[in-house]
Image: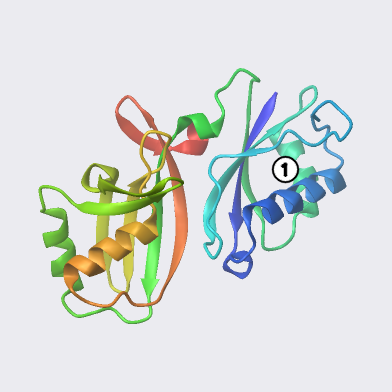
Amino acid sequence: MKMIVVFEKSPRLRHIGHLDLMRAMQRAMRRSGLPLRYSQGFNPHILLSFAAPLSVGMPGQREIMEVPIEGTMTEAAFSAMLSPALPPDLPLLSCRAVPDEHPAPMALLAAATYEARFQDVPSGLGDAVERYLNQPEIPALRKTKSGEKPCDLKPMIYGLTLTGDTLRMTLALCEAATCKPDLLLDSLFSFAGTARPRALITRTALWGQEGGCFKPLEAL
């Protein structure tokens, strides 16, 4: 069986990279005494996988990982063993038992929601957001391993709203298409004709699709 685990990466740990996060989780799981499943070979490791790595500098409110378990156990027992072993800034929020054949969260991932909280909100930004979304196309240059490539961001933007000092973005995040929040913010402020203000960007949710509708990834 497997556990789909939802956890938080707090703002205090936002500068921890993905490999360090993975090592921290593996150490916590070893301390927990859970009946974990390991790889074969000279250096066995826990068969742990994450739905989507977080960029360095970004907290995550509802991050998701998959933990394979030997045998069976209840969600309550899993939580009771893992929670005390986790660092305070990586709390377990929930877990759900699924069979081994259940698709990996990474395979079901379709989009993510981010919130950018600005130190100073430029005047007229709300109007600029509306005009930005009304464009027939939103051209941008996306960095790839082979260099910069032109792309259209519009089909990758599922939601973009400004409330007070916070811009909420729901963007494509899958193998077929990915729009990173930094790329969108650079594009938006270039369109608005103003310098991009400093902001703390937090990933608040991961989404999958079922029946043409977005649903929380941990529920699929």
> Seen in the image, is 154 located left or right of residue 52?
left
**Residue at label 1?**
79
Q: Residue at x 67, y 57 (%)?
A: 90
Q: Residue at x 32, y 82 (%)?
A: 120
Which image quadrant is residue 114 in?
A: bottom left
Residue 202: give x, y in percent of width and height.
Answer: 46, 61
Q: Residue at x 31, y 65 (%)?
A: 186
- Element under disc 1: helix
> Seen in the image, is 126 located left or right of residue 158?
left
Crowding at dot 1, Cα within 10 Å, few <14 / some 14-19 / many 20+, comes out as some
> Seen in the image, is 103 located left or right of residue 23?
left
Which amino acid type is marked by label 1? Ser
Picture quarter with the N terminus:
top right
Residue 99: give x, y in percent of width and height.
Answer: 64, 20
Residue 177: give x, y in percent of width and height.
Answer: 36, 39
Labels in figure, total: 1
The residue furthest front is 146
Coloring scheme used? rainbow
Q: Residue at x 89, y 31 (%)?
A: 42
Which image quadrant is residue 207 in?
A: top left
Residue 68: give x, y in percent of width and height.
Answer: 72, 30
